[in-house]
Amino acid sequence: MAIRLYNTRTRSKEDFVPLDPKNVRMYVCGPTVYDRAHIGNARPVVVFDVLFRLLRHTYGEAHVTYARNFTDVDDKINAKAAETRRDGETLEQTVRRITDETIGWYHEDMDALGALRPTHEPRATEYIAQMVAMIEDLIGRGHAYEAEGHVLFEARTDPDYGSLSRRPLDEMRAGARVEVAPYKRDPMDSVLWKPSTDEQPGWPSPWGRGRPGWHIECSAMAGDLLGEAFDIHGGGIDLQFPHHENECAQSRCVGHDFANIWMHNGYLLSEGEKMSKSLGNFFTVADLRAKGVPGEVMRLAMLMTHYRSPIDLTERALDEAEKTLRKWRRLEEADLQYSNRLKPQGKIIDAVYAAIADDLNTPKAISILHEAAKNGDAGSLFLGSELMGLLTVEMQNWPWNNYPPEANAYGSMIDFQLCERAAAKKVRNFARADAIRDALVAAGVEIKDTPQGAEWSLTPAFDATKLPEAEDV
C-alpha cells in the first residue's frame, strides 16, 4: 500500500518513494533549549512520531533513520544565561547548565507524550566544524560574503530562492519591515556566522571567534547525518519561512539535493487564539501534566485534528480525548482479563493503516477505531491504536480505570459483557445481545446505547451476585 504525503514544495500529495528503501531518512527541526517546551512545540513531535512509526512499520525499524536536533547556541539562550548566571560561573558554563537542564525537561515531557526517541538528537554545538566548512564552501562558490566580522548568505545568488514558501524575492524584499543591518548587501541576506564577545559562547573560524546563525545549523547537521540528499524534512508551519527557505537555499547552493519532501504541521491554538504570554493562554506540557492531564490524552487530542490544519486545544477537546481513552483502555482490559482473545480483524487494521498512509489522516483512523470499539473489537482497537502510539504499555500509567467505587471489582466484567453484546449485534445475533442486556439489567446495571457504543451505570438495586459469569455470556 502506497504512502502518500503532502509536499509543501509542490503543494500536492505525492506517492512516497524513498531514495533507498533500506535507508529511509527524515529530519525534523527540534527546539531551542532555554525553557520548558510549550504545547505548540509538542505538536510536531507527535505528528512526526506518527510518521516515524508508519515508516518503521512499512520499511522495518532497522531501515529508518530519524534525526531531530537541539539548538543549543542562540541569542535567547545567551540572554537567559546572563539573567540566571551563578556566582563563579562563566557565561559559557551557565549556557551549558541551562541547555543540559532544558534537554532533560524536553525528554521528560516528550516521553510523557509517547514519542519515540529519534535515532539521532544532535546538538548544534557538536557540529560547528561542519558549519564552518559549509560556510567556506558557500563563500568559495560566490553565494556568501564577509562583512564586519559577519558572514552572510546572499539570497539573490540563488535563482530558486523563495520556491519553498512561494515568495518571490522582490516581494519579500519590498515587505521587509525590520531595520536592515548596515553590513547587509540586501535585506533578505541571512547571517551564517556572527562575532562573539569574549564572554559569549564562541568558536574559532576563518572570520574570527564567533558562533553560527540559526539556518546554517540544520543544513549542516542534516547533511552530515543523513547525506546530501534524504527523504523527508519536517517542522511547524512557522518554520517554513525564513528557516526552511534558507536551509533549502544554502544546501542547494553547495550542490546538495537536500530533502525530497517538505512537510509542515499547522499552528496550535488555545481556545481559538494563537498562544501568547501576553494573552495568558500560553502553557507548557509540564503545566498540563501538573494539572493532571495525562500525556496520552494530550497526544490523542492533537491527533483528532489533521496535522496540516490549525488545532484548537481546548478543555473540551482534552475532556473528549480523556473520555475516549478511558473507554478504549477499559475495553482492552476487559477483553484481556476475561477472554484473552484480542483477535483483530485484518480489514480494520488495514483501514487504519490506509488512513495513516494517506498523508497521516489520523482523524479518519480514529473514526475507524471508534467503530471498532463500538463493535467490541478490542483486538483491532489495540493494534490499530499502536500505529499512532496510543494504548501502549508505556502510556498506561494514569488512572484511566474510573469505575464507580461500588463497581471496582466488577467493572471489567460489565465492560466485557457489553463488548460481547456489541459483537453479537455486529453479526445480527440479536437474541444473544438481548440476553446479555437482560442479564445486566436484572443485576441492576443501567445501559444507555449511544452512537459511540453502550454506556453503563449502577442503579441502587445493583446486586453483584446476580451478574452472570463470563462463560455464561
Image (spheres, helix red, strand yellow):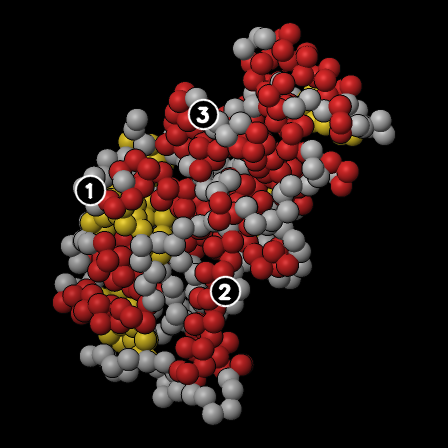
The kind of residue tagged 2 is: Trp
Secondary structure state at the residue bearing disc 3: loop
Name which of mark 3 and mark 1 comes first in the sequence: 1
Q: Nearer the viewer, residue 320 or 311?
A: 320
Residue drawn where x is 45% and y is 81% of the image: 94
* Alpha carbon separation for disc pair 3 and 1: 31 Å
Q: Could you say where residue 174 lies in the image, as x and y percent from the top left? A: 40, 55
Q: Could you say where residue 285 lies in the image, as x and y percent from the top left? A: 56, 56
Say if mark 2 contacts mark 1, CB within 8 Å. Answer: no
Name which of mark 2 and mark 3 comes first in the sequence: 2
Name which of mark 2 and mark 1 comes first in the sequence: 1
Q: Is residue 360 left or right of residue 65?
A: right
* Residue on which disc 3 sits: 343
Q: Is residue 227 left or right of residue 365?
A: left
Which one is closest to the eye, mark 2 or mark 3? 3
| The C terminus, quarter of image | top right
> Is residue 289 depicted above or below 165 in this figure?
below
Secondary structure state at the residue bearing disc 2: helix
The kind of residue tagged 3 is: Lys
Asked whether residue 16 is in view, the answer is yes
* Residue on which disc 2 sits: 105
* Alpha carbon separation for disc pair 2 and 3: 39 Å
